[in-house]
Image (cartoon, rainbow, N blue to C red):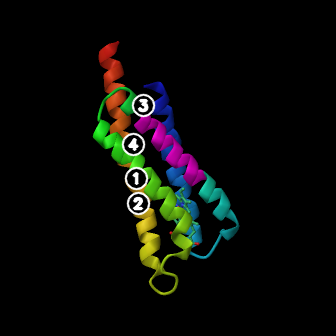
Amino acid sequence: MVLSRSLLAVMRVAMAVQVIVGIGFWTGHWYGLVNVHMAIGVLYVLAFWVIAGAAIAQKRATGLALFAILWGIVIAAFGMMQQRILPGDLHWIIRVLHLAIGIAAMPLAERLAAGQMRELAHAA
Ligand code: HEM
């Protein structure tokens, strides 16, 4: 599906930006960009959801797609709350978790979109 392929590209670019900006936060810089980071994070989750929704619409990999929708909620909810979770010395655990949860969406999206593109190739 052309849409999924484009959204996958959006997710790849968004992830790269998120990690670079995140490393800035980590090292105590660019705090003025937290809102931008959150907006890009929301975009990342929306793209993920549309890829998952397309799989569900095609009745393909439905289990994985439902899990992806759930995972998107986890990414957004954790991101919105993370500044308030475990503040202090142990906050690095939350930071590593936030990064891992965000990055983990990428291979799921790749798998869902790859399946959709295979389906399209067979149909052609
Ligand atoms: C809706 C989605 C997201 C929201 C609301 C969100 C929110 C945030 C916030 C508020 C911070 C600053 C934390 C602090 O001040 O300590 C942060 C940091 C960070 N974010 Fe995100 N984020 C989202 C998605 C992502 C994604 C998808 C990635 C990577 C794939 C990512 C990577 C990072 C990294 C590396 C940091 C710096 C380390 C840290 O503080 O955790 N974020 N994020």
Task: Estimate how packed mark 1 is, as few (under 14), some (14 to 19) or many (20 or more) residues with alpha carbons within 10 Å.
Answer: many
Question: Of the residues shown, which amino acid type is indicated by label 3?
Answer: Ala
For disc 2, the marked residue is: 101
* Image: magenta residue range: 40-53
Question: Do the residues under discs 4 and 2 have CB atoms within 8 angstroms?
Answer: no
Q: Is the residue marked 2 within 8 Å of ligand 1, measured from its CB?
A: yes
Which class describes the residues within 10 Å of circle 3: few (<14), some (14-19), or many (20+)?
A: some
* 116 sits left or right of 81 in the view: left
Question: Of marks 4 and 3, which one's residue comes earlier in the chain?
Answer: 3
Q: Secondary structure at mark 1?
A: helix
Which amino acid, mark 2?
Ile
Q: Which of pointers 4 and 3 indicates the residue nearer the eye?
A: 3
Label 4 and label 3: CA atoms lie apart by: 11 Å
Element class at badge 3: helix
Q: Secondary structure at mark 2?
A: helix
- Give the label on residue 71, or none: 1
Q: Is residue 36 above or below residue 47?
A: below
Between disc 1 and disc 3, whose residue precedes? 3
Q: Earlier in the sequence, mark 4 or mark 2?
A: 2
Vertical side of 101 occupied by 67: above or below: above
In the image, what residue occupies the spot 39% across and 42% down? 109
Query: At 51% from the left edge and 57% from the top edge, which residue is drawn?
Result: 76
Dot 2: few (<14), some (14–19), or many (≥20) neighbours within 10 Å? some
Which numbered mark, 2 or 3, is in the foreground of this view?
Answer: 3
Badge 2 or badge 1: first in the primary sequence: 1
Residue of label 4? 109
Badge 1 amino acid: Trp
Alpha carbons under labels 2 and 3: distance apart: 22 Å
Image coords of residue 6 (percent x, y)? 50, 33
Q: Which mark is in front, 2 or 1?
A: 1
Can you see residue 101? Answer: yes
Report the disc number at residue 54: 3
